[in-house]
Amino acid sequence: MEEQIAQNCEQSLSVSVSKRHSLRALSSIRSLINNPNTSNSTLSSLLETLTRSLQLTDSDSLTRHHELTLLAGLSLRHPHFSPLISNSLRSNSLLFSSCSPRLAAAAAFAVISDHTVDDRFFVSLCFASSVSVRLWLLRNAERFNVRPHLLFTVCLGLTKDPYPYVREAALNGLVCLLKHVVFEDVDLIQGCCCRAVELLRDHEDCVRCAAVRVVSEWGKMLIACIDEKNRIDCSDVVFIQLCSMIRDMRMEVRVEAFNALGKVGMISEIVLLQTLSKKVLGATKEKKFHSLGAAECFEISASAAAGTFVHGFEDEFYEVRKSACSSLGSLVILSEKFAGEALNLLVDMLNDDSVTVRLQALETMHIMVTCEHLNLEDKHMHMFLGTLVDNCELVRCAARKILKLLKTPKLEFFRLFIDGLLENLKIYPQDEADVFSVLFFIGRSHGNFAACIIKEVCHKIEPDSDDKLGFDNARVAAFLVLAISVPLSCEQNVRSIPPQIFSYAVTLLGRISYALSDVMNQHSLLAYLSLCSRLSNFSEANFKGEDAPLHEAKSDDPNCPTEVSIGADIRMQKSGDEASKSRSWIHGKLKETVTSRCQLEEEDEIWKALNLVLAKVRNVWSLVQSGFSKEALRILRACKEEVLTFKAESRGFDGALLFSLQYFKVLKLLTKVWEQFVPAKNIHHYEQGELEFLLGKLDRRLRELGCRFLGLSKEEELHVLELMLVSCLLRLSKFEICFYYTTMRNLSSTISHLEFLHQQGSTEPSNFVTAVKKSLFEINISTSHTSYRPFLFNQLLNSFSLSQLVFHGRLEQVHAELGVPDNSSENPVIFVSGLPVSIPFEITLYNISSVNRLWLRMTMSDETTQFVFLDSNLLGGCKDAKKFTYVAPFYRTPKAASFTLRVCIGMECLFEDVHSVKGNGGPKRALAYLCNEKEVYFSRVSRG
């Protein structure tokens, strides 16, 4: 049969027929190539047919493209034909001189699909007459094991190509080269920088953009290689050279220039200050440097950086203004003086028309306050506090984050902060929880100021003339939150606040505890308010030791930083047994208060330590992309061990710690898979089955991250979904395991979910997500495999960069426990072959809601699987734990003396596409498993 099909195809392609008949014949050839049972003789015949058809001069370019794609597929699926295919196509010069870029690229792909291209042939193709081939080879240079220095020479030479897109691709190739190779020859690096500086004046926009990237990346390499005494000057030269591009006519070039400025690193303070003033400063007038350009005698003045950020903030395009704010955020940590001067310009960006610019400006201010370089003055207050009533929720939230960390030595500034938060609460009541949280934090860090404010507004909190309390007033509730934070400050004690204030706060327990959920739970808050209201009733006269107020006492806990001494320093007037009991009660409550405060401080430290570990993980990704997998895995193991040390000392952090450990497992799997896409430093080559197993395991781990944890913030969900995108692209980059249609459907579904979350949070997607989304429009999912474009997916993977994962609150893990009472290999369940058997399960579910769809999966040794749905009516609306007995039937009892079932509980991933798995009466979506598999033993009933 296959010989007959091959003969029909040969006849169709050897004579002049309609395009429709040609494409039908090619479709038949594709089926034979993809069929693993096709004989070698038939494949050889098909190879001859395709080669002969390519030599026909009357073939149209579309037919040739399909033929070349089929040859590439034949080479991939049947590697023993690769040398024949390569030799045949290399001899056909017409293909590589074709004016069709698509055809030339397809020919190049077919030639190199066997990965046996030597350096000589690669260079001959790069300098061939076909522009399309040169362009394609430069864009896909990472696929070949070409010697790095040879690739450097080729790329550097092609920067003088007459065609702009070739020059751009050559410059991008120089940047990509640094991801895999470390150059130590200073002259070589200077030569590359010199050529890039020349191309900063190129007529084409795309070339100038690429040249900026080369100056930035190779400039950093030059700074690292040069001797230490000249390092600052070299850094200044690179920085000033990039500053010269911020006045470029094209918006894209200016954005690229500002992005590059934030990556330079160390810059002298005088050059930084010059970027904030259009007027040339006296100290920079005479400061000259040797340029990176070709002429060694050419000098560049520090005054060339004059007004760099002024021009950036005044730019007509919001993309440039946003990039300028982002770049400034990387530089303000270098100098406190520079940060102070930059703030004068930055606050004007808080009134920008673009939401993204305002958000980026606030992000830069957040960096300033984190490194203690944010010094707000009177002239800044109006613009900054105006962001608290911005019409964008994200802007208001970003401003409140800054206030949480901000400390001011001026009472009038503190009043303005409080007034701004109250105005925020008045205009946007939906922000109440976050506003209360900020009031609590700033009250705790400014105890004296907060106590002063409360004394002034005490009369507003008291009942009115009709003995009615205005606790439904949000303003009154805000003052109560501010008041209850004062005793936790080191500046004031509990007696500085009237006792009735704490009693009033109890009436708003639900609202306040919801706002302070990241600090304490409702039970702890109630105990704290009750304690403070009682302790405040004791006046100074009740204490003999008046010089030892509450906040100066010493704790019995050696780990507690707060000094509270309970015992001899506090002495009450003794009046029999009642006084003695009162004293004992106070001593105990004081210990509880101090311990609670210490626990809060310890929790803050643990959160900070955990986020610092996750910051290290982000830096590991550059090693993975460069092919240093062993080093990356070693760092991941160290991070895992560091997180495990938290487990013994942390209470209430189990969810976050388990999430972190699962996250490390995902990155470990991702690192192992990524090895296959860095051929220059490939450490271990996995067989097709092994790679598919790793990708399957990676998908399961990612589903568990996305489904099995409650309390994930939008940022954390987006982070997990981006990793799911990477997993899909990794599959699509390997022809043998891509499962094209299924993976493309999963990719599209994940993109849709990302779009929904971005729209819901009014945030912009990352460059990686934007690139993937744009590429989906270029791919028609319903077309045949001849449209399969693995290089496109490889390019998308190269645009991925791992963002930092930051925890924003507590997490709860969804999990289950499964057991069968009194079941073992010695005490099996009795069954009758061919009849259903009942299995009594004891199930405990943790943090499951009625929304979740749960399934029992039962699998026999022959991989026969049956699913049983767990009715949501049995689950109720439990949030913590629910234990129950469930009798599940198993219908497929075999004709055997005994058998074993592997049983586990799975939960449908609601973000997955419906029918993402074959139903057959089972789940419609992929499952995330909540427990380990449990073995259940069965024995056939013995005949009487």
Image (spheres, rainbow, N blue to C red):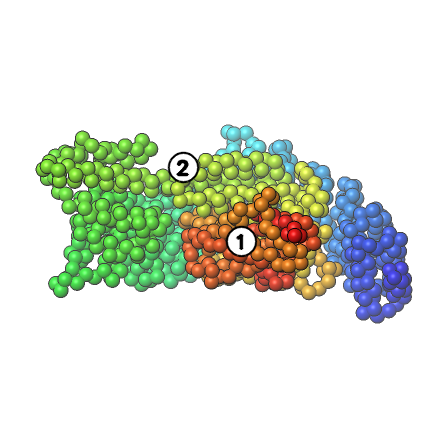
Q: Which residue is drawn at 56% across and 51% down?
A: 904
**Mark 2 or 1, nearer chain start:** 2
What is the distance, in whole Å, between disc 2 and disc 1 at their CAs? 38 Å
Q: Note whether residue 408 is visible.
A: no
Dot 2 and dot 1 residues touching (CB under 8 Å): no
Q: Position of residue 89 (x, y in %)?
A: 83, 51
Which residue in the structure is indicated by mark 2? 649
Q: Residues within 10 Å of mark 2 (few under 14, many from 20)?
A: few
Tell me which amino acid carries mark 1. Pro
Q: Is residue 510 left or right of residue 634?
A: left
For image coordinates 34% across by 54% down, the residue present is 514
The answer to whether residue 115 is above or below residue 468 is above
Helix, strand or loop at label 1? It is strand
- Please tell me in which quadrant of the rendered image residue 429 appears: bottom left
Say which mark, if any, is on residue 840: 1
Q: Which residue is more in the foreground, 136 or 405?
A: 405
Residue 926 location, x and y as percent?
Answer: 58, 57
Toward the viewer: 801 or 345?
Answer: 801
Residue 659 visible: yes
Q: Which amino acid does label 2 sit on?
A: Glu
Under circle 2, the secondary element is: helix
**634 to the left or right of 551:** right
In-image side of 454 versus 787 (left or right): left
